[in-house]
Image (tube, rainbow, N blue to C red):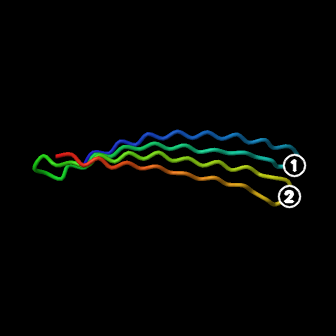
Amino acid sequence: MKKFLLGAAAALAIAAPGVAAADSADVGLSFSNTDAGSGFDVDTWNLSGAYVHSLDGNTILQFDGEHSKLDFGG
């Protein structure tokens, strides 16, 4: 089984004495190839991402998403 994993992450943080406000983001991309024998294989693609935003006080907004694709070859 071959696996290739590509990942990228981005983060932005702002901090000042006594005040902590931060936005952060994460992006991931992966590819996997599984050889099941007899000329049959499965390719798997995955793309994911997340974003976090801190509001005033103790409230945080978080958004996540993921998309996967399977390709059965023969």
Q: How dense is the environment of label 2, judged by Cα within 10 Å: few (below 14), some, or many (20 and up)? A: few
Marker disc for residue 57: 2
Q: Residue furthest bottom?
A: 58
Residue 54 x/y as whole percent: 77, 52
Which amino acid type corresponds to the residue marked 1 in the rendered image? Val
Indicate the position of residue 42 as horizontal and vertical percent values: 25, 49
Q: Nearer the viewer, residue 66 or 11?
A: 66
Please tell me which residue is depicted at 73% across the width and 49% down the height of the picture. Answer: 53
Q: Quadrant of residue 59?
A: bottom right
Disc 1 target residue: 19
Residue at 81% x, 44% y: name it.
Answer: 15
Of marks 2 and 1, which one's residue comes earlier in the chain?
1
Who is closer to the viewer here, 16 or 39?
Answer: 39
Q: How many marks?
A: 2
Residue shown at 13%/51% (left/top)?
Answer: 37
- Residue 59 tag number: none
Q: Residue at x 41, y 44 (%)?
A: 30
Q: From the viewer's perspective, tell me whether residue 60 is left or right of residue 5.
A: right
